[in-house]
Every structure is written in structure tokens, then in C-alpha cells.
Amino acid sequence: MNRNISTLGSILLLLLLAAWIGHAWQTSLVRADDNAPRTDNAPQAGVLHSVYFALKDQSEEARKRLVDACKKYLSDHPGAKSFSAGVRAADLDRSVNDTDFDVALYLQFETKAAYDKYQTAEKHLKFIEENRDNWKNVRVFDAYVAP
């Protein structure tokens, strides 16, 4: 009889432990979902659009021309929450810094739909047409970000 009670107690303890672990795991998933956009809801998330231009002519004047063109053509698009453009901070040269660019462009869009419209917008296409001849390399980093 004592052995049956001991076995029953062990089984009950294991079931309680399994239930607690399952609850803790589900709770952690809910918390993760609350804090970060997931792939399945990405169209509702904002889009962070970061572009890094390496120029053929790396003169100060050429860098300024590209920053000015970014401001002229890319700063005022519908659905854009923020815009920034500037030259690489040459004095920030830690070992982890990527220094293989001359001008950086940053746009954050409220939605993927706004980002999609930007890609084919006349002003965006005009910017590319007028400036691409001086681009040695262009790197684009797009990410879904929490609204």
C-alpha cells in the first residue's frame, strides 16, 4: 500500500511539474509575441529602410550632393515616419564599425504598403536616375519593426 501511495505521489508530482513547465513556456511565448513583430503579421509592422552608398567620387562635395539629393527626393514620402541622411562619421572608427560607405540614408515607414509605394514613387525613381552613376556600391537593409 505504501509503495502504491509513493508511486501515485511521484506521478502526481511529475504531472504538476509538467503542467507548470507548459504554463511557463506558453507565457514566455505570449511575452515574446507582444514585444516583437512576427513574420505572419509583418505587413502590419513598420519597415525600417537603411541604405549605405559607397561612392566612386568620394570627395566632400560629392558626398554633400548625394545627401542633398536624398533630402530633395526622399524626405517627404507618404507613410514615412522618419527620414535621415548624412555622411559617414569618419571619427567613429571602432573595430566593430563598418566603414565601407560614404553616405547613409534612413527611412522608417508606418506600414509595408507605404514602403511598397515608395519603391515605385516617381521621386524615388528620379533620385536613382540622377545619382546612380556615382555609386560604386549600394547596400540596402530592410527590416520589419514594431509600430
Image (tube, rainbow, N blue to C red):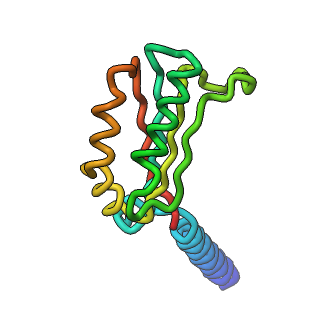
> Where in the figure is residue 134, as x and y percent of width and height?
39, 20
Quarter of the image holding residue 115?
Answer: bottom left
- Of residues 94 and 123, the one nearer the viewer is 123
Is residue 7 among what the camera can see?
A: no
- Of residues 131 and 120, the one nearer the viewer is 131
> Where in the figure is residue 43, as x and y percent of width and height?
34, 64
Give the quarter of the figure containing the N terminus: bottom right
Work out whether 12 lies above or below 82.
Answer: below
Is residue 136 among what the camera can see?
A: yes
> Where in the figure is residue 143, as x and y percent of width and height?
45, 49
- Of residues 31 and 3, the one nearer the viewer is 31
Q: Which residue is drawn at 32% across and 35% down?
A: 128
Query: What is the number of callouts on the image?
Result: 0
Q: Residue at x 39, y 58 (%)?
A: 77
> Where in the figure is residue 124, as x and y percent of width and height?
32, 45
Q: Is residue 59 left or right of residue 45?
A: right
Q: Residue at x 28, y 32 (%)?
A: 129
Work out whether 79 lies above or below 126.
Answer: below
